[in-house]
Amino acid sequence: MWVFMSDSFLSIVAHGTDPALLVVRARHQGDIERAFPEVKAIVDKEADYLYHAHVPRERVAERLSEFVGSIAYPNFKNTVVDPDRHDAYMDIWSTMYKMQVRGRTGW
């Protein structure tokens, strides 16, 4: 699962051996800690995502619920303050919009 937040981009996947854990991954330093302040990310220079942390599945679900519950904006893109992050998000938005326009919405 990819999660885009105003100040963080996370990839969340199953832990390889422990179903009670999820692996929260990020490409940028601080993204995991902004989403999960109690967690310290580990750096792995050999991995696809440079930063990762093992987080209890229940904590991830709780935190995602908190994020959803706090949504107060009518336009997500306007909440992304960092210009580089905003540009990256816009690239992804544009790619998905192009798929919609081409009629490829039914996968």
Image (tube, helix red, strand yellow):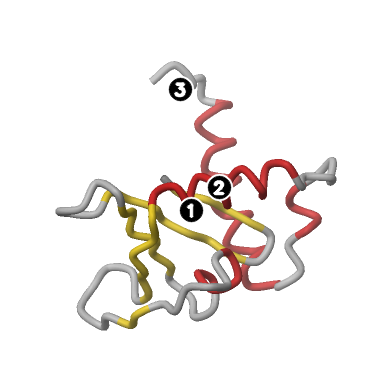
**Horizontal and vertical percent for residue 26?**
43, 67
Q: Look at label 1 and name its amino acid.
A: Arg
Foreground label between 3 and 2: 2
Q: Secondary structure at mark 1?
A: helix
Question: Which is nearer the N-term, disc 3 or disc 2?
Answer: 2
Residue highlighted by disc 3: 104
- Figure check: 67 above or below 103: below
Q: Look at label 3 and name its amino acid.
A: Arg
Q: Nearer the viewer, residue 32 or 60?
A: 60
Q: Quadrant of residue 25?
A: bottom left
The label shown at residue 59 is 1
As drawn, is 75 to the left or to the right of 59? right
Question: Which is nearer the N-term, disc 3 or disc 1?
Answer: 1
Q: Residue furthest top?
A: 106
**Horizontal and vertical percent for residue 81?**
76, 69
Quadrant of the drawing holding the N terminus: top left
- Figure check: 73 above or below 9: above
Q: Nearer the viewer, residue 10 or 94?
A: 10
Q: Residue at the spot x=84%, y=46% of the render?
A: 73
- Callout 2 touching callout 1 (CB < 8 Å): yes
- CA gap, disc 3 to disc 1? 35 Å
- CA gap, disc 3 to disc 2? 33 Å
Q: Secondary structure at mark 2?
A: helix
The label shown at residue 62 is 2
Q: Quadrant of residue 11?
A: bottom left
Q: Look at label 2 and name its amino acid.
A: Glu
Question: For mark 1, does the 10 Å Cα neighbourhood hold few (<14), some (14 to 19), or many (20 or more) residues?
Answer: few
